[in-house]
Amino acid sequence: MKFLGKMLAVLGLVATTLWAAPEASPAANKSPSPTDSKAIVTAGKVDIEVFAKKQNATFHWYPVQKTFSLVAGRDTVKFAMGLPYAHVNGKSIQLKSAPELLDNRIWIDSVDTKKLLVKKAVSSSSVAISSAATPASSTSVAKASSSSTATNPIAIAKPKNETAGTREVKTIVIDPGHGGKDSGALGAKAQEKDIVLAVGKLLKKELEKEGFKVKMTRDKDVFIELGQRANLANGWDGDLFISLHCNAIDGKPEQKKQVKGYHIYVLRAPESEEDKAIARRENKVATLYGEKNAKEELSPIEWFKLEARLEKYKQNSYMFTEELLKANDGGKIRKQAGGVGGAGFMVLVGALMPAVLYEIGFISNPDDEAYMMTAKGQEDIAQRISKAVANYKAAVHNYRETLGR
């Protein structure tokens, strides 16, 4: 929090000074590229990017979602253009006014910088900290200060109720996509719902051999609403959510022969039209069967509102994705392109835990479909996922040990 305190404290001081307005940067739809280090405040507005640069923070601009963030160490502040809110390390703070794009630079009201600042005296020095953190009492600070010079190490109390993603990995939730009246994608000979159910059952057996507690959103050919799947996973207090699917494309036979491979998706704003299209296809079932509050695509503002919650699980979702990529090395079904993408899959939106949607192959591709239909292929896919889960568990355990948990 040291960086945020320093950054915001100085912002509060310079807000009373009117400096020269910055020169315009090229292309309003791109990240501003400030060159004038003195262009920090104009008409009560703070050029947040210039100041971040002076403080050695990184600035991230997402033109599609019209959001941006400042990152320094473990501290992150996120904003959305036109939305009078900010997320400071995952906690929401209301702003006086929304960030603005003027002269191809992003500006925030100088008054809002003061809202993000709380000052506390620590020993003989004054340290500024973000209001997103919980201020320590003067008594606890004094104890910590004195004990830091003692020969005995400071005891770190273990959290009483750790959340998914920070605790040991024990419960895995498998979600075989589609089912019942929803067949999913169709191949020349098979249906998506049947393949993913078969793989899901085999995966359950493999994981149980490894000592995991395993739950399935469905273990037979029944229809479960997308929103209900995440609710089931939350009710079971899962540590990892894996939604199994088969990919598909519409096109001529020649095209279907060319497009093949597995792809792993996490819940994040889509970076390509292809990812958006896949999410719309998977989400269409919700609108097709009249699910309440169903959507085929999330708006930029909805993405921003999800950010605080997603931040808790995003890193672990990526961690598991990496293990899944490694486990699939040398497999019959190779990764499609980079093998990883992100989009607004509704089945992942409500899951309060690390989660991925795994397209195990293209059912529209003759080779992928044939392999996914065989008992050998299904067993191989299940074993590779199980290996990834076991390695993910070990990685989380090792990380916890470094924290003394």
Image (cartoon, helix red, strand yellow):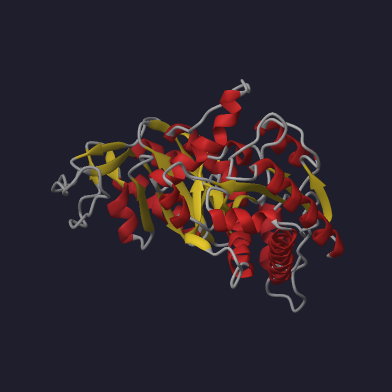
Q: In the displayed structure, would residue 54 be above or below residue 13? A: below
Examine the rendering and report whether any part of residue 17 can be seen. no
Q: Measuring from the top left, give residue 335's x and y in whole percent.
A: 52, 62
Expressed as whole percent of the image width and height from the top left, the position of residue 332 reads 60, 67
Picture residue at 36% right of the left edge, 54% below the top: 59
Image quadrant of residue 402?
bottom right
Give how far across and how far down residue 77 sits, in percent: 46, 48
**Quick check: 169 left or right of 129?**
right
Instruction: Name above or below for residue 174 compared with residue 301.
Output: below
Q: Assign the C terminus to one quadrant of the image.
A: bottom right
Q: Is residue 35 left or right of residue 3?
A: left
Residue 98 quadrant: top left
Examine the rendered structure and indicate whether residue 279 appears above or below residue 156: above
Look at the picture and state if 290 lies above or below 274.
above
Residue 28 horizontal side relative to residue 58, left or right: left
Give the percent coordinates (x, y) of residue 137.
Answer: 67, 50
Nearer to the camera, 190 or 39? 190
Residue at image location 51% in from the left, 31% down from the top: 296
Instruction: Count the numbered circles shown.
Output: 0
Q: Is residue 73 visible?
A: yes
Q: Is residue 102 left or right of residue 388?
A: left
Say which of 202 and 386 sits in front: 202
Q: Nearer the viewer, residue 226 or 104?
A: 226
